[in-house]
Image (cartoon, rainbow, N blue to C red):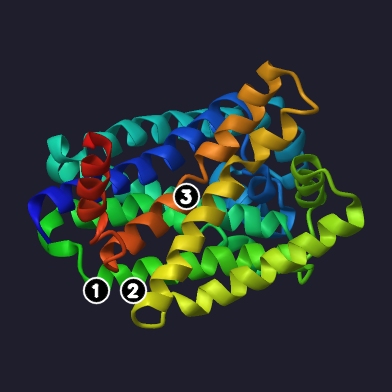
Amino acid sequence: MQGKSSTFWFRILQWSAASVLFARGWQHLYWDAPFRTLLWDQAWMESTVQTVLGMDWQAYVTHPNTDWWIQQLVFGTGVFYVLAGLVAITVQRWGRSGRVVLWMSSFSLLILAGLYCKEKFFFLGQFLEYALQFTAPAVLAWVAVAPERRFNRSLLLFLKVCIALTFTCHGLYAAGYYPRPGYFVFMVMSILGVDEVEAAQFLMVAAALDFILSVLIFLPGRVARIALAYAVFWGLSTTIARPWAYAYVATWDTVLLQWVHEAVMRFPHFLVPTLALGLSGGFKRLPQIRQQFGLVLKR
C-alpha cells in the first residue's frame, strides 16, 4: 500500500482505538463498571477469597473496605484506559512499550466484555457485540509494527469477521432473539417519531439488514463494497443515536455526561467498516471525483 494511503488508514485505526479507550476511561472514572458482577459472586469467588485473603465470605462482602477497594480498582482501570488512549494517538513515538500497552488495554476490554456477558446471563451475543471495540487497540498495535506491509488481505478478513460479529449480535437483540432492550425501542420512537409497534417493525428490518450485510461483506467485488458502505452508514447512525435520542428528554449536561461517551466508544462501528471499505478498494475513484469536482467549481 502506498505511503500516503497507509498513513491515512493508520490514522483511522488510531482514532478507532483511542475513542474506545477514552470513552471507557470516562465510564470508569465518572460512572462505574461491572466488576462487582464477578467480585461479589460467591460461587465464583468464595474459594479465592478464603485462600488469598484468609476471610470467610460473609466477612468479605460486609467489610466496608471491600467496596472501597473495588472502587479503586474501577478508578485505576479508568486511568489506565485514558493513558492507553493517549498512547494510541502517539503509538509510533513509544515503540514496543506503546504496543505492549495497547495489547494490555485490548485484553482489559476483552475482560470487560466478559463481565458484561456474565451480567447478561452469559448471552454469547452480549460478548461478541464488543468485537470491534476490544480488538481495536490490538489491531493498532499489530499494524504499528509495519503499517505499509500489514494493511493486507489477512487484516481485511479479520476486520470483516469483527464487523460481522458486532452487527450480527446487534441484530440478534434488535430482532428479539435475545430480550430486546427497551432503549432500542425508545431511541427509534424518539428519533423517527413513530409508535411502539412501528419501532419494533423498524428494528426487525434493521436486524435483517444487519444479518444480510454480515454475509455480503465476505463476497468478492462490488457487492462486498456496497455492504461495507451500508455498514459505515448504519454504524455511524447507531453511534450517534444515543445522544440524539436522549437530547429530547434530558438536559444538555446530562446528555454530555451520560450519553456522549456511549457514542464515542462506538466509533469503531463506523471507522472500522470505513477502513475495510478502503482496503477493499472502495475509495479508488475518490481522487478522480475530487479532481472532477474541483474542475466543476472552477467553471
* Residue 129 in which image quadrant: bottom right
Task: Report the side of 200 relative to 134 (left or right).
Answer: right
Label at residue 153:
1
Residue ID at (70%, 21%): 254
Q: Estimate the spatial distance between the alpha carbons at disc 2 and disc 3, rounded to whole Å.
A: 22 Å
Q: Residue furthest front?
A: 299
Q: CA distance from mark 2 to mark 1?
A: 6 Å
Location of residue 260 with respect to 16 vertically, above or below = above
- Look at the numbered disc 2 and give the secondary structure of its residue: helix
Vertical placement of residue 173 versus 92, above or below: below
Give coordinates of residue 281: x percent, y percent.
26, 66
Q: Nearer the viewer, mark 1 or mark 3?
A: 1
The answer to whether one can see residue 61 in this image is yes
The residue wearing badge 3 is 109
Given the image, on which type of amino acid does mark 1 rest? Arg
Residue position for label 2: 157
Question: Where is residue 256 shown, x and y percent of the image?
Answer: 61, 23
Residue 65 horizontal side relative to residue 94, left or right = right
Which amino acid type is marked by label 3? Answer: Leu
Whether 207 is drawn above or below 216: the answer is above
Taking the image as shown, residue 151 lies to the left or right of residue 163, namely left
Circle on res. 72 = none
Q: Quadrant of the C terminus?
A: top left
Q: Residue furthest left?
A: 3
Say if mark 1 contacts mark 3, CB within 8 Å.
no
